[in-house]
Image (spheres, coloured by chain):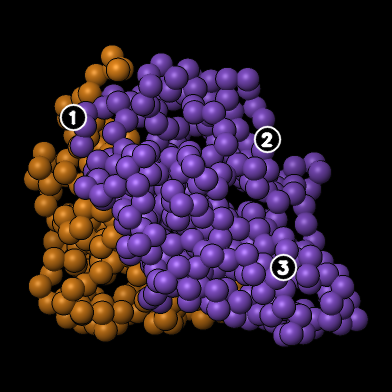
Amino acid sequence: MTNLPTSSSITLQINGAAHYLELDNRTTLLDALREQLDLTGAKKGCDHGQCGACTVLLDGRRANACLLLAVAVADRQITTIEGLANDQQLHPMQQAFIAHDGLQCGYCTPGQICSAIGMLAEARAGWPSAVTAPAAGSAAPTDPLVTDPLLPDDEIRERMSGNLCRCGAYVNIVAAISEVATA
Amino acid sequence: MKQFGYARAESVEQALNTLTSTSSARYLGGGTNLIDLMKLGVLSPDLLVDVRALPLDQITEQPDGSVRIGAAVTNSDLAVDPLIRQRFPAVSQAVLAGASGQLRNVATVGGNLMQQTRCSYFMDVSKPCNRRAPGTGCPARTGEHHNHAILGASEHCIATSPSDLAVPLAAFDAQLVLHGSDGESTVPISEFYRLPGDQPDQLTTVADGTLVVGVLLPASDLAGRSRYRKVRERASYAFAIGSVAAAISVTDGVIGDARLAWGAVAAVPWRARLAERALIGQPASTASFRAAAQAELAHAEPLTGNSYKVELLSNLTVEVLTELVEASA
């Protein structure tokens, strides 16, 4: 048996603010956010990385907070749904979800919005997806935003497949993301 | 989940020393599989040695033309890397066909290769499972096994490897770069994974505590025109029920060389060497492709619930080889 302590003193960087915490090493980032810091925007759905309701941005990239140990992400920059608005000005993705009615019950929405923001950053960086067509004469995929700056719906659906919506609001979720993608 | 200690490794040597200080320690990469298995009670390490921040996050071309991928490279960074996309497109395609955007951003190459089967009996601690609890039996053979192995299984275990990445790595003769008590060594991927035999709890052939520090992909002209195709039960974000990584060269209508590996058919990424041999020297035709797939599948031992995989792999192989030949014409 190890003699290393089973709890840790860590600093989490969340939405630009440092939070000092004493945590059992078992604590996931999701539980630290919700239970210790009262940041209940990120939701616990499956708690196994299958539904995406807990999606946050980790150093700007989307990630499932339920599968991250808080102790392992100390000192990394974490953005949650609570950190997206600029004072009273909603993030364009939040505004688009409202404008397109991209939700019904709203439980998956914080994860959908964080995931969509991370996903568009990936697409703008030229990342291909599994549905990006190979370049002519090559087995290598092209960059979707280079060949089609509108990011077609099939690309949005593939890239957002890690976020489930049990209400089935997908049609409006895709429309909301598409609007921001083309803005 | 049981309580555990946590240590962030500052160097490979320190990681090794820390891990071997206790009997049930585990290396932590991205954790997307390990943390899940700890929540389920399948694994209960008393110490996690975090190796994610080790300087193993580069993809570099070596002087001999091979490409070295650090074990801490995330799946996303691997899939979008220009060198990988150009030289080993099937590797990029395999990674993009797996998991979700969120998981690919966190999961590492080392973790991907060390991940455990998703057999539902292995994942459920209330059920017997020789892989999780040796000697308790395997309920899958007579139970739910629609996504279990048709090749290389044993009476003790019929689980499949869940990794998409490992399939093209097997096709292109990747070497795993390991760091153990004797320092750094390499082992071909074909000798790294174990078929279950009578010890299905042993995932690999290497000693406990050995750290995967990287993957070496040897230079290959064939791999530059490779493809990965995956069949799954929904359009996205699901494990394969069959997959193919392939490359082929054809001169004047005759097959000169071929690489072929299958996923979701065995406990290891399955290099289809019998099929490769059957292809070489034959005309590049549907009949040749079909015959080659059959040469490999003649050794399949399907069960009631997974017999569909035999025809699936045959059809998938014919389709991918046909596409590759058409794309190069």
**Residues tagged 1 and 2 counted as in contact (Cβ below 8 A):** no
In the rendered image of this protein, does residue B69 appear above or below residue B296?
above
Residue pointed to by mark 1: A24
Q: Residues within 10 Å of mark 3 (few under 14, many from 20)?
A: many
Residue pointed to by mark 2: B186
Q: Amino acid at mark 1?
A: Asp
Mark sitting earlier along the chain (2/3): 2
Q: Quick one: SS at disc 3? A: helix
The chain under label 1 reads: A
In the rendered image, residue B177, in percent from the top left (x then y), is placed at: 63, 36
Whether residue B132 is visible to the viewer of this picture, yes or no, is no
Q: Amino acid at mark 3?
A: Ala
In the rendered image, which quarter is residue A85 located in? bottom left
The chain under label 3 reads: B
Q: Quick one: SS at disc 1? A: strand
In the rendered image, which quarter is residue A109 located in? bottom left
Disc marking residue B275: 3
The chain under label 2 reads: B
Spatial separation of the CA atoms under disc 1 and disc 2? 37 Å
Q: Amino acid at mark 2?
A: Thr
Q: Residue at x 60, y 72 (%)?
A: A141
Q: Residue at x 80, y 81 (%)?
A: B284
In the rendered image, residue A26, in percent from the top left (x then y), is placed at: 22, 34
Whether residue B288 is visible to the viewer of this picture, yes or no, is yes
User: In the image as oriented, which residue stretches furthest toward the right?
Assistant: B252
Q: Residues within 10 Å of mark 2 (few under 14, many from 20)?
A: some
Q: Residue at x 39, y 82 (%)?
A: A153
Q: Residues within 10 Å of mark 1 (few under 14, many from 20)?
A: some
| Pointer 1 and pointer 3 on the same chain | no
Can you tell which chain is drawn purple?
B
